[in-house]
């Protein structure tokens, strides 16, 4: 944490953030670690290391504000195509993050959840992940939801297979399928849809993130690279969100 940073209460007052109008679910596409490193003539892995520090700061701020759910896109199904070196560095960073943050999550009442093809994660990472999910399961505070080996299309295919199998077995009438049925069979069945989706590093795309769930999310794309993303900018984005007129198709 930045030691020069003002207490969160002061920052909330200064920005004019209304704690009763916070998004219930913030989802973030944490992008730009590689470019951050390149700008400094470092390697991509240094960018991911610096990005992990931003994760800590944004998790802390979200918890302090009282945001109920924070989803972080940490690794996509497509990211498996990156070099073996980069993938293994990301996996070991993830493991280190889980190990170091477990006490922090316990102390702050944070409950860990994960979505994605978790079975594709290396054994040791999966073990730490499941242990941390189990240890934090009764924590009453924020849900920290990590999207790991996650792809929105793969999630929809999985949901379709589950429903098709139920229909074939005779336990589901196809005519009874509603939007709620679909939501209930996604990885996110236990979470509300995101109110706010933030993407760092300026790319104007979704990159296979939460395709179904973001139907009515407010979007915010910032050019800031993830390792440079600060509490100050996060608070500005939340303030901006509070000034939006969410209409959900109504006049
Ligand atoms: C985001 O940063 C982290 C992951 C996708 C794992 P990138 O690694 O995509 O960084 P850029 O987009 O190349 O700058
Ligand atoms: C999206 O970023 C995935 C994560 C942030 C984990 P990418 O860097 O993989 O997406 P593209 O390649 O820019 O679409
Ligand atoms: Mg990227």
Image (cartoon, grey):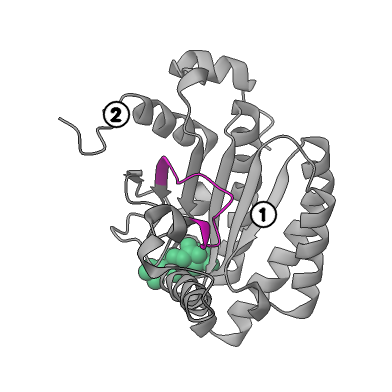
The stretch in magenta equals 184-197
Q: Is residue 100 rendered magenta in the image?
A: no
Residue at 70% from the left image edge and 35% from the top image edge:
141
Residue at 51% from the left image edge and 62% from the top image edge:
186
Task: Tell me whether circle 2 and circle 1 mark residues in contact (CB < 8 Å).
Answer: no
Q: Which mark is residue 113?
A: 1
Can residue 40 be seen from the camera position used here? no
Residue at 61% from the left image edge and 78% from the top image edge:
87
Residue 96 in the image: above or below residue 224: below
Q: Label 1's element?
A: strand
Q: Where is residue 56? Give x, y as percent.
A: 66, 46
Image quarter hosting the N terminus: top right
- Front residue (pair 126, 88): 126
Q: Which residue is mark 2?
A: 244
Q: Nearer the viewer, mark 2 or mark 1?
A: 1
Q: Where is residue 35? Give x, y as percent.
A: 44, 64
Residue 18 vs residue 58: left or right?
left
- For the stretch drawn in magenta, the main secondary structure is loop
Residue at 55% from the left image edge and 50% from the top image edge:
71
Q: Where is residue 44? Give x, y as percent.
A: 54, 70
Image quarter hosting the C terminus: top left
Residues at marks 2 and 1, CA–CA distance in whole angstroms: 29 Å
């Amino acid at each position: 944490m930045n030691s020069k940073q003002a207490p969160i209460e002061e920052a909330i007052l200064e920005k004019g953030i209304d704690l009763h109008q916070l998004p219930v679910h913030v989802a973030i596409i944490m992008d730009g670690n590689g470019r951050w490193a390149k700008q400094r003539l470092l390697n991509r892995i240094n960018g991911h290391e610096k990005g992990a520090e931003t994760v800590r700061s944004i998790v802390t701020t979200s918890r302090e504000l009282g945001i109920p759910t924070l989803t972080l896109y940490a690794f996509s199904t497509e990211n498996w195509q990156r070099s073996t070196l980069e993938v293994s560095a990301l996996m070991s960073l993830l493991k280190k993050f889980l190990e170091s943050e477990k006490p922090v999550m316990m102390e702050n009442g944070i409950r860990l959840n994960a979505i994605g093809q978790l079975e594709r994660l290396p054994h040791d990472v999966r073990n730490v992940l499941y242990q941390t999910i189990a240890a934090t399961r009764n924590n009453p505070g924020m849900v920290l939801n990590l999207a790991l080996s996650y792809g929105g299309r793969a999630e929809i295919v999985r949901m379709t297979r589950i429903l098709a199998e139920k229909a074939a077995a005779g336990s589901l009438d196809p005519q009874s399928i509603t939007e709620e049925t679909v939501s209930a069979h996604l990885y996110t069945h236990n979470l509300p849809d995101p109110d706010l989706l933030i993407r760092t590093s300026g790319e104007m795309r979704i990159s296979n993130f939460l395709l179904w769930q973001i139907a009515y999310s407010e979007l915010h794309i910032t050019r800031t690279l993830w390792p440079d993303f600060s509490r100050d900018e996060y608070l500005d984005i939340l303030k901006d969100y509070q000034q939006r007129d969410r209409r959900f198709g109504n006049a």
